[in-house]
Amino acid sequence: MKSIIGVDLAVKVIQVCVYTNNKVQSNTEMTPEQFSAYLSTLIPSKVVFESCAGANYWSQLASSYGHNARLISPRLVKVVRQNQKTDKNDALAIVQASLLPDINFVAPKTSQET
C-alpha cells in the first residue's frame, strides 16, 4: 500500500508523519534541506500539506518528484487534531484528516500564480 505523508510546515523545521498499512510508521522533525532530499528519494506517495504560505512551494516540489501532493484546510486539521497544538500533533492530524471520506482538498497555486 502506498504511504500517506502528513507534513506540518514551520519556518525552520518540517514535521513529517508517515502513515502506511493503517499505522503511523514515524513522525519526525526535518530541516527543509533534509525534507527536500527525503522527497527526492521517496517512492511516489500521497503527500498532504496543511494549506499555508509555504505549502504551494512544497506541493509543487513534491509533484515534480512524482508524488500526489495535496493541500488540506487548516480549519479541518484543527477540528481533527487531538491534544494540544504541537508540530507532531499537527502532522498526525493532517494524515487523519486526509483519510476522512468525501474530503475536499484545497487547490494548489500553479508556479505562475505564486
Image (cartoon, rainbow, N blue to C red):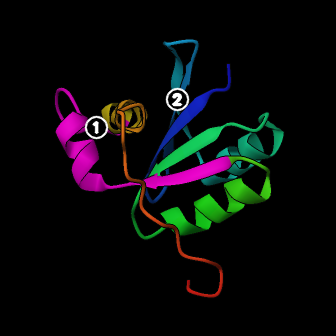
Residue most toward the front? 102
The amino acid sitting under disc 1 is Thr
Check the picture and name the quadrant holding the N terminus: top right
At which x and y percent is residue 102?
36, 41
Horizontal relation, residue 98 to residue 20: left or right: left
Viewer-side residue, 79 vs 99: 99
State whether residue 10 is above or below residue 57.
Answer: above
Residue in the image at 56% along x and 86% along y: 113
Quadrant location of residue 79?
A: top left
Task: Assign a secondary structure to mark 1.
Answer: loop
At which x and y percent is residue 87?
35, 39
Quadrant location of residue 30?
A: top right
Q: Residues within 10 Å of mark 1 (few under 14, many from 20)?
A: few
Check the picture and name the quadrant holding the C terminus: bottom right
According to the image, label 1 marks what residue? Answer: 86
Viewer-side residue, 42 vs 28: 42
Q: Residues within 10 Å of mark 2 (few under 14, many from 20)?
A: some
**Of callouts 1 and 2, the N-terminal one:** 2
State whether residue 5 is above or below residue 61.
Answer: above
Alpha carbon separation for disc pair 1 and 2: 12 Å
Task: Assign a secondary structure to mark 2.
Answer: strand
According to the image, label 2 marks what residue? Answer: 28
Label disc, if present, on residue 45 of the rendered structure? none
The amino acid sitting under disc 2 is Thr
Magenta stretch bounds: 68-87
Residue in the image at 52% along x and 68% along y: 108
Horizontal relation, residue 81 to residue 24: left or right: left
